[in-house]
Image: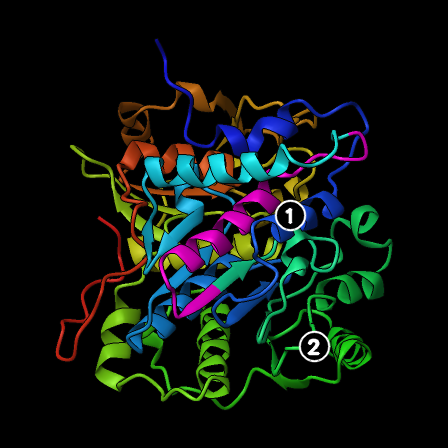
Protein backbone atom coordinates (compact mmCIF):
# COMPACT_ATOMS: atom_id res chain seq x y z
CA UNK A 1 0.00 0.00 0.00
CA UNK A 2 1.33 3.43 -0.93
CA UNK A 3 1.96 5.65 2.09
CA UNK A 4 0.69 9.21 2.30
CA UNK A 5 3.15 11.93 1.26
CA UNK A 6 4.68 13.76 4.25
CA UNK A 7 3.11 17.07 3.20
CA UNK A 8 -0.42 15.73 2.80
CA UNK A 9 -1.92 17.71 5.69
CA UNK A 10 -0.43 20.94 4.38
CA UNK A 11 -2.40 20.65 1.14
CA UNK A 12 -5.58 18.91 2.35
CA UNK A 13 -7.81 22.01 2.49
CA UNK A 14 -6.17 23.52 -0.59
CA UNK A 15 -6.99 20.42 -2.60
CA UNK A 16 -10.61 20.48 -1.34
CA UNK A 17 -11.19 24.22 -1.83
CA UNK A 18 -14.33 25.37 -3.63
CA UNK A 19 -14.30 27.48 -6.83
CA UNK A 20 -13.68 31.09 -5.90
CA UNK A 21 -12.86 30.28 -2.28
CA UNK A 22 -9.95 32.14 -0.75
CA UNK A 23 -7.67 31.40 2.14
CA UNK A 24 -8.72 32.35 5.66
CA UNK A 25 -6.31 34.26 7.86
CA UNK A 26 -8.84 34.00 10.68
CA UNK A 27 -8.76 30.22 10.62
CA UNK A 28 -4.96 30.30 10.47
CA UNK A 29 -4.97 32.61 13.49
CA UNK A 30 -7.24 30.18 15.32
CA UNK A 31 -4.83 27.30 14.59
CA UNK A 32 -1.96 29.46 15.82
CA UNK A 33 -3.78 30.16 19.06
CA UNK A 34 -4.82 26.54 19.63
CA UNK A 35 -1.18 25.50 19.31
CA UNK A 36 -0.04 28.22 21.70
CA UNK A 37 2.03 30.01 19.05
CA UNK A 38 0.78 33.55 19.68
CA UNK A 39 3.73 34.12 22.02
CA UNK A 40 6.67 32.40 23.60
CA UNK A 41 8.58 32.03 20.33
CA UNK A 42 12.24 32.88 19.75
CA UNK A 43 13.10 36.36 18.44
CA UNK A 44 11.74 36.65 14.92
CA UNK A 45 13.12 38.12 11.70
CA UNK A 46 10.51 38.45 8.94
CA UNK A 47 11.47 38.96 5.29
CA UNK A 48 8.99 40.60 2.91
CA UNK A 49 9.25 42.02 -0.61
CA UNK A 50 8.78 41.02 -4.24
CA UNK A 51 12.15 39.57 -5.22
CA UNK A 52 15.12 38.11 -3.39
CA UNK A 53 13.34 37.08 -0.18
CA UNK A 54 14.82 33.58 -0.19
CA UNK A 55 18.37 34.88 -0.56
CA UNK A 56 17.81 37.41 2.22
CA UNK A 57 16.35 34.78 4.56
CA UNK A 58 19.14 32.29 3.83
CA UNK A 59 21.96 34.73 4.49
CA UNK A 60 20.27 36.15 7.57
CA UNK A 61 19.92 32.63 8.96
CA UNK A 62 23.53 31.74 8.17
CA UNK A 63 24.79 34.92 9.86
CA UNK A 64 22.75 34.17 12.99
CA UNK A 65 24.00 30.58 13.02
CA UNK A 66 27.58 31.85 12.80
CA UNK A 67 26.98 33.38 16.21
CA UNK A 68 26.45 29.91 17.64
CA UNK A 69 22.65 30.09 17.73
CA UNK A 70 20.20 27.47 16.54
CA UNK A 71 18.12 28.92 13.72
CA UNK A 72 14.87 27.68 12.22
CA UNK A 73 14.11 29.06 8.75
CA UNK A 74 10.94 28.92 6.66
CA UNK A 75 11.23 29.73 2.95
CA UNK A 76 9.19 29.15 -0.18
CA UNK A 77 8.71 27.76 -2.68
CA UNK A 78 10.50 24.43 -2.58
CA UNK A 79 12.35 23.08 -5.59
CA UNK A 80 12.19 19.28 -5.36
CA UNK A 81 10.70 18.48 -1.95
CA UNK A 82 8.54 20.44 0.47
CA UNK A 83 10.92 19.38 3.24
CA UNK A 84 13.18 22.15 1.88
CA UNK A 85 10.75 24.78 3.16
CA UNK A 86 11.61 24.07 6.80
CA UNK A 87 15.25 24.08 7.89
CA UNK A 88 17.16 23.83 11.15
CA UNK A 89 20.61 25.39 10.94
CA UNK A 90 20.40 25.21 7.15
CA UNK A 91 19.43 21.54 6.94
CA UNK A 92 16.06 20.57 5.49
CA UNK A 93 13.84 18.64 7.88
CA UNK A 94 13.21 14.95 7.31
CA UNK A 95 10.00 13.63 5.77
CA UNK A 96 9.09 12.18 9.17
CA UNK A 97 9.49 15.53 10.90
CA UNK A 98 7.38 17.25 8.25
CA UNK A 99 4.64 14.64 8.49
CA UNK A 100 4.59 14.91 12.28
CA UNK A 101 4.22 18.68 12.15
CA UNK A 102 1.43 18.28 9.61
CA UNK A 103 -0.48 15.91 11.88
CA UNK A 104 -0.31 18.39 14.76
CA UNK A 105 -1.59 21.19 12.54
CA UNK A 106 -4.39 18.96 11.27
CA UNK A 107 -5.42 18.05 14.81
CA UNK A 108 -5.73 21.74 15.69
CA UNK A 109 -7.63 22.46 12.47
CA UNK A 110 -10.16 19.71 13.20
CA UNK A 111 -11.24 21.65 16.28
CA UNK A 112 -12.28 24.60 14.10
CA UNK A 113 -15.62 25.14 12.34
CA UNK A 114 -15.92 23.78 8.80
CA UNK A 115 -13.93 25.67 6.20
CA UNK A 116 -16.89 27.47 4.62
CA UNK A 117 -15.36 30.92 4.87
CA UNK A 118 -11.96 29.94 3.54
CA UNK A 119 -9.27 27.28 3.54
CA UNK A 120 -6.00 26.95 5.40
CA UNK A 121 -3.37 27.75 2.79
CA UNK A 122 -0.31 25.53 2.36
CA UNK A 123 2.06 28.50 2.66
CA UNK A 124 0.42 29.58 5.90
CA UNK A 125 0.59 26.08 7.36
CA UNK A 126 4.30 25.87 6.58
CA UNK A 127 4.81 29.13 8.49
CA UNK A 128 2.88 27.73 11.46
CA UNK A 129 4.90 24.52 11.22
CA UNK A 130 8.10 26.56 11.33
CA UNK A 131 6.96 28.25 14.52
CA UNK A 132 6.15 24.84 16.02
CA UNK A 133 9.54 23.52 14.97
CA UNK A 134 11.35 26.50 16.48
CA UNK A 135 9.60 25.92 19.79
CA UNK A 136 10.24 22.16 19.67
CA UNK A 137 13.94 22.59 18.96
CA UNK A 138 14.45 25.47 21.43
CA UNK A 139 15.75 27.63 18.59
CA UNK A 140 17.57 30.83 19.38
CA UNK A 141 16.04 32.62 16.39
CA UNK A 142 13.27 32.16 13.84
CA UNK A 143 13.46 33.52 10.28
CA UNK A 144 10.27 33.63 8.20
CA UNK A 145 9.96 34.42 4.51
CA UNK A 146 6.59 35.89 3.56
CA UNK A 147 4.60 34.66 0.59
CA UNK A 148 3.30 37.28 -1.82
CA UNK A 149 2.11 39.77 0.76
CA UNK A 150 2.74 40.92 4.29
CA UNK A 151 -0.28 41.94 6.34
CA UNK A 152 -2.44 39.85 3.97
CA UNK A 153 -0.13 36.86 4.44
CA UNK A 154 -0.05 34.40 7.35
CA UNK A 155 3.40 35.74 8.17
CA UNK A 156 1.52 38.73 9.57
CA UNK A 157 0.21 36.53 12.37
CA UNK A 158 3.60 36.80 14.08
CA UNK A 159 5.19 39.88 15.64
CA UNK A 160 8.75 40.28 14.29
CA UNK A 161 11.56 41.94 16.18
CA UNK A 162 13.26 42.88 12.89
CA UNK A 163 11.77 43.22 9.41
CA UNK A 164 13.83 43.04 6.20
CA UNK A 165 12.27 44.46 3.03
CA UNK A 166 13.68 43.35 -0.31
CA UNK A 167 12.96 45.09 -3.65
CA UNK A 168 9.25 45.72 -4.17
CA UNK A 169 7.74 45.65 -7.65
CA UNK A 170 4.24 46.47 -8.88
CA UNK A 171 3.13 42.84 -9.19
CA UNK A 172 0.09 40.93 -7.91
CA UNK A 173 -1.74 44.26 -7.90
CA UNK A 174 -5.21 42.72 -7.73
CA UNK A 175 -4.29 40.64 -4.70
CA UNK A 176 -2.42 43.32 -2.77
CA UNK A 177 -4.56 46.42 -3.09
CA UNK A 178 -4.47 47.62 -6.69
CA UNK A 179 -1.67 50.23 -6.50
CA UNK A 180 2.07 50.43 -5.73
CA UNK A 181 1.33 52.31 -2.52
CA UNK A 182 -1.12 49.59 -1.43
CA UNK A 183 1.50 46.90 -2.13
CA UNK A 184 4.03 48.70 0.05
CA UNK A 185 1.46 49.18 2.82
CA UNK A 186 0.59 45.48 2.73
CA UNK A 187 4.19 44.30 2.87
CA UNK A 188 5.16 46.81 5.56
CA UNK A 189 2.05 45.74 7.45
CA UNK A 190 4.02 42.94 9.12
CA UNK A 191 5.60 45.56 11.39
CA UNK A 192 4.17 45.04 14.85
CA UNK A 193 4.39 46.38 18.40
CA UNK A 194 7.51 44.33 19.06
CA UNK A 195 9.41 45.50 15.98
CA UNK A 196 12.70 47.16 16.86
CA UNK A 197 14.12 47.78 13.39
CA UNK A 198 13.13 47.71 9.73
CA UNK A 199 15.94 47.42 7.19
CA UNK A 200 15.31 48.07 3.52
CA UNK A 201 17.33 46.99 0.52
CA UNK A 202 17.79 48.99 -2.71
CA UNK A 203 14.48 49.65 -4.45
CA UNK A 204 13.82 49.80 -8.23
CA UNK A 205 11.55 52.84 -7.79
CA UNK A 206 12.94 55.78 -5.77
CA UNK A 207 9.44 56.54 -4.52
CA UNK A 208 9.21 53.13 -2.85
CA UNK A 209 11.56 54.01 0.00
CA UNK A 210 9.44 57.03 0.92
CA UNK A 211 6.31 54.88 0.78
CA UNK A 212 7.94 52.29 3.02
CA UNK A 213 8.95 54.96 5.51
CA UNK A 214 5.39 56.30 5.63
CA UNK A 215 3.88 52.83 5.97
CA UNK A 216 6.25 51.84 8.78
CA UNK A 217 5.63 55.09 10.64
CA UNK A 218 1.89 54.52 10.34
CA UNK A 219 2.27 51.05 11.83
CA UNK A 220 4.52 51.62 14.80
CA UNK A 221 7.17 54.26 14.31
CA UNK A 222 9.84 51.56 14.19
CA UNK A 223 13.33 52.68 13.24
CA UNK A 224 13.82 52.49 9.47
CA UNK A 225 17.24 51.92 7.97
CA UNK A 226 18.21 51.82 4.33
CA UNK A 227 20.87 49.32 3.37
CA UNK A 228 23.98 50.93 4.74
CA UNK A 229 26.47 50.49 7.61
CA UNK A 230 26.58 46.95 8.86
CA UNK A 231 28.88 43.93 8.82
CA UNK A 232 31.88 44.36 6.53
CA UNK A 233 31.44 41.54 4.03
CA UNK A 234 33.80 41.05 1.06
CA UNK A 235 32.07 40.31 -2.23
CA UNK A 236 33.73 36.89 -2.36
CA UNK A 237 31.48 35.80 0.53
CA UNK A 238 28.28 36.83 -1.23
CA UNK A 239 26.39 35.59 -4.28
CA UNK A 240 26.92 37.15 -7.69
CA UNK A 241 24.50 39.32 -9.63
CA UNK A 242 21.31 40.79 -8.24
CA UNK A 243 21.40 38.49 -5.21
CA UNK A 244 24.37 40.27 -3.68
CA UNK A 245 22.37 43.22 -2.34
CA UNK A 246 19.76 40.87 -0.88
CA UNK A 247 22.45 38.81 0.83
CA UNK A 248 23.89 41.97 2.38
CA UNK A 249 20.39 42.94 3.48
CA UNK A 250 19.96 39.59 5.21
CA UNK A 251 23.24 39.90 7.08
CA UNK A 252 22.44 43.48 8.12
CA UNK A 253 19.00 42.42 9.39
CA UNK A 254 20.57 39.53 11.31
CA UNK A 255 23.13 41.87 12.87
CA UNK A 256 20.32 44.19 13.98
CA UNK A 257 18.48 41.23 15.49
CA UNK A 258 21.54 40.11 17.44
CA UNK A 259 21.98 43.66 18.74
CA UNK A 260 18.30 43.93 19.66
CA UNK A 261 18.59 40.76 21.76
CA UNK A 262 21.79 41.85 23.44
CA UNK A 263 24.03 39.30 21.76
CA UNK A 264 27.44 40.02 20.24
CA UNK A 265 28.30 39.88 16.57
CA UNK A 266 29.71 36.49 15.55
CA UNK A 267 33.49 36.14 15.16
CA UNK A 268 34.71 37.25 11.75
CA UNK A 269 36.44 33.93 10.86
CA UNK A 270 33.24 32.02 11.59
CA UNK A 271 31.12 34.47 9.59
CA UNK A 272 33.47 34.17 6.64
CA UNK A 273 33.55 30.38 6.71
CA UNK A 274 29.77 30.12 7.10
CA UNK A 275 28.81 32.64 4.43
CA UNK A 276 31.31 31.19 1.97
CA UNK A 277 29.57 27.83 2.28
CA UNK A 278 26.07 29.13 1.50
CA UNK A 279 24.57 27.54 -1.61
CA UNK A 280 21.57 28.92 -3.49
CA UNK A 281 20.65 26.40 -6.21
CA UNK A 282 18.76 28.07 -9.01
CA UNK A 283 20.11 31.53 -8.24
CA UNK A 284 23.05 31.94 -10.63
CA UNK A 285 24.30 28.54 -9.54
CA UNK A 286 26.84 26.70 -11.66
CA UNK A 287 26.57 22.95 -12.17
CA UNK A 288 28.45 20.24 -14.01
CA UNK A 289 26.17 17.87 -15.91
CA UNK A 290 27.18 14.39 -14.66
CA UNK A 291 28.98 12.22 -17.17
CA UNK A 292 29.48 15.04 -19.66
CA UNK A 293 31.69 18.03 -20.32
CA UNK A 294 28.67 20.36 -20.11
CA UNK A 295 28.36 23.07 -17.50
CA UNK A 296 25.11 24.91 -16.79
CA UNK A 297 24.30 28.21 -15.11
CA UNK A 298 20.81 27.97 -13.63
CA UNK A 299 18.83 31.03 -12.56
CA UNK A 300 15.17 31.63 -11.69
CA UNK A 301 15.11 34.93 -13.58
CA UNK A 302 11.71 36.11 -14.83
CA UNK A 303 12.26 39.81 -15.64
CA UNK A 304 14.60 41.81 -17.92
CA UNK A 305 17.02 42.79 -15.14
CA UNK A 306 17.36 39.15 -14.17
CA UNK A 307 17.77 37.97 -17.78
CA UNK A 308 20.58 40.42 -18.49
CA UNK A 309 22.32 39.75 -15.18
CA UNK A 310 22.20 35.99 -15.73
CA UNK A 311 23.51 36.31 -19.27
CA UNK A 312 26.43 38.49 -18.16
CA UNK A 313 27.30 36.08 -15.37
CA UNK A 314 27.09 32.99 -17.58
CA UNK A 315 29.22 34.59 -20.29
CA UNK A 316 31.92 35.37 -17.75
CA UNK A 317 31.71 32.13 -15.75
CA UNK A 318 31.52 29.76 -18.73
CA UNK A 319 33.59 31.87 -21.13
CA UNK A 320 30.60 32.08 -23.45
CA UNK A 321 27.13 30.54 -23.84
CA UNK A 322 26.32 27.93 -26.49
CA UNK A 323 22.58 27.64 -25.85
CA UNK A 324 19.88 29.09 -23.61
CA UNK A 325 16.87 27.24 -22.22
CA UNK A 326 13.97 29.46 -21.17
CA UNK A 327 10.68 28.65 -19.45
CA UNK A 328 8.26 31.56 -19.00
CA UNK A 329 4.50 31.02 -18.68
CA UNK A 330 1.95 33.65 -19.71
CA UNK A 331 2.28 35.77 -16.57
CA UNK A 332 6.04 36.33 -17.05
CA UNK A 333 7.96 38.71 -19.30
CA UNK A 334 8.50 36.77 -22.52
CA UNK A 335 9.13 39.93 -24.61
CA UNK A 336 11.83 40.95 -22.14
CA UNK A 337 13.51 37.59 -22.53
CA UNK A 338 13.30 37.83 -26.32
CA UNK A 339 15.02 41.20 -26.23
CA UNK A 340 17.75 40.06 -23.84
CA UNK A 341 18.46 36.86 -25.79
CA UNK A 342 18.17 38.24 -29.32
CA UNK A 343 20.44 36.44 -31.78
CA UNK A 344 21.15 33.49 -29.48
CA UNK A 345 20.05 29.88 -29.93
CA UNK A 346 17.13 29.32 -27.53
CA UNK A 347 14.91 26.40 -26.56
CA UNK A 348 11.57 27.37 -25.00
CA UNK A 349 10.59 24.81 -22.36
CA UNK A 350 7.03 24.23 -21.14
CA UNK A 351 6.17 22.59 -17.82
CA UNK A 352 3.02 20.53 -17.43
CA UNK A 353 1.32 22.02 -14.36
CA UNK A 354 -2.26 23.10 -13.72
CA UNK A 355 -1.27 26.63 -12.72
CA UNK A 356 0.96 27.32 -15.75
CA UNK A 357 -0.19 28.48 -19.20
CA UNK A 358 1.91 28.88 -22.36
CA UNK A 359 -0.47 30.35 -24.94
CA UNK A 360 1.65 33.18 -26.36
CA UNK A 361 3.55 32.72 -29.63
CA UNK A 362 7.24 32.18 -28.96
CA UNK A 363 9.84 34.30 -30.77
CA UNK A 364 10.88 33.21 -34.25
CA UNK A 365 13.65 30.63 -34.24
CA UNK A 366 12.99 29.39 -30.71
CA UNK A 367 12.35 25.64 -30.63
CA UNK A 368 9.79 24.28 -28.19
CA UNK A 369 10.21 21.37 -25.81
CA UNK A 370 8.32 19.93 -22.84
CA UNK A 371 10.28 19.66 -19.60
CA UNK A 372 9.39 15.99 -19.32
CA UNK A 373 11.43 15.37 -22.49
CA UNK A 374 14.59 16.88 -21.05
CA UNK A 375 17.33 14.45 -20.15
CA UNK A 376 21.08 14.66 -19.68
CA UNK A 377 21.93 13.48 -23.18
CA UNK A 378 19.68 16.11 -24.71
CA UNK A 379 21.21 18.87 -22.58
CA UNK A 380 24.71 17.77 -23.46
CA UNK A 381 23.74 17.81 -27.13
CA UNK A 382 23.01 21.55 -26.90
CA UNK A 383 26.61 22.40 -26.06
CA UNK A 384 29.10 22.49 -23.22
CA UNK A 385 28.12 25.95 -21.96
CA UNK A 386 24.41 26.31 -21.16
CA UNK A 387 22.20 28.86 -19.45
CA UNK A 388 18.81 27.84 -18.01
CA UNK A 389 16.36 30.61 -17.09
CA UNK A 390 12.78 30.68 -15.88
CA UNK A 391 10.26 29.79 -13.23
CA UNK A 392 10.87 27.61 -10.21
CA UNK A 393 9.06 24.62 -11.74
CA UNK A 394 11.51 24.58 -14.66
CA UNK A 395 14.55 25.32 -12.51
CA UNK A 396 13.62 22.37 -10.30
CA UNK A 397 13.67 20.05 -13.32
CA UNK A 398 17.14 21.23 -14.39
CA UNK A 399 18.48 20.89 -10.85
CA UNK A 400 17.15 17.34 -10.78
CA UNK A 401 19.03 16.51 -13.98
CA UNK A 402 22.32 17.89 -12.65
CA UNK A 403 21.87 16.11 -9.32
CA UNK A 404 22.04 19.25 -7.18
CA UNK A 405 22.01 18.71 -3.41
CA UNK A 406 19.15 20.77 -1.97
CA UNK A 407 19.26 19.41 1.56
CA UNK A 408 21.63 22.03 3.01
CA UNK A 409 21.75 25.82 2.67
CA UNK A 410 25.15 26.14 4.31
CA UNK A 411 27.74 24.13 6.21
CA UNK A 412 28.45 24.53 9.89
CA UNK A 413 31.64 26.47 10.35
CA UNK A 414 34.33 27.02 12.93
CA UNK A 415 37.23 29.46 13.14
CA UNK A 416 39.86 28.58 10.60
CA UNK A 417 37.53 26.54 8.39
CA UNK A 418 38.23 26.70 4.68
CA UNK A 419 36.27 29.13 2.59
CA UNK A 420 35.39 26.54 -0.01
CA UNK A 421 33.88 27.13 -3.45
CA UNK A 422 30.78 29.10 -4.26
CA UNK A 423 29.98 26.82 -7.19
CA UNK A 424 27.74 23.80 -6.82
CA UNK A 425 29.11 20.56 -8.22
- Determine which quarter of the picture holds residue 395: top left
Q: Position of residue 271 (x, y in %)?
A: 29, 78
Q: Is residue 141 magenta?
A: yes
Give above or below for 252 relative to 328: below
Residue 20 percent coordinates (x, y)? 82, 28
For the magenta stretch, what is the residue range? Answer: 116-142
| Near-viewer residue (231 or 320) | 231
- Label 2: which residue? 193
Choose top left, top right, bottom left or bottom right for residue 155.
Answer: bottom right
Crowd band around label 2 with a 10 angstrom C-alpha radius: few (<14), some (14–19), many (20+): few
Whether residue 16 appears in this view of the structure is yes
Secondary structure under the numbered disc 2 in the rendered image: loop
Q: Residue at x 28, y 42 (%)?
A: 404
Q: Seen from this angle, which residue lies furthest right?
A: 178
Q: Is residue 232 above or below residue 336?
A: below
Q: Earlier in the sequence, mark 2 or mark 1?
A: 2
Q: Nearer the viewer, residue 24 or 274?
A: 24
SS for dot 1: helix
Amino acid sequence: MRSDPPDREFFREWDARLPGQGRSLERARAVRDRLGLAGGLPPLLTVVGSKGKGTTASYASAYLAAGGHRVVTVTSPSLRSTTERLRVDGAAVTAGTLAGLGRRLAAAARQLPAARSGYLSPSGLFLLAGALLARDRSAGYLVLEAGRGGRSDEVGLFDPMVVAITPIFAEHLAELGGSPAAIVADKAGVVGPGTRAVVVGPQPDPATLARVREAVAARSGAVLEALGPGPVLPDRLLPPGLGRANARLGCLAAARLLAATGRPAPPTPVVEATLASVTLPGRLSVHALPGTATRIVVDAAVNPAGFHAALRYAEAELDGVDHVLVSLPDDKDLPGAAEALAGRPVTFVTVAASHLRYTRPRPAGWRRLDASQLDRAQLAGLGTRLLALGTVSFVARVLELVGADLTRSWSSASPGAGLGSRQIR
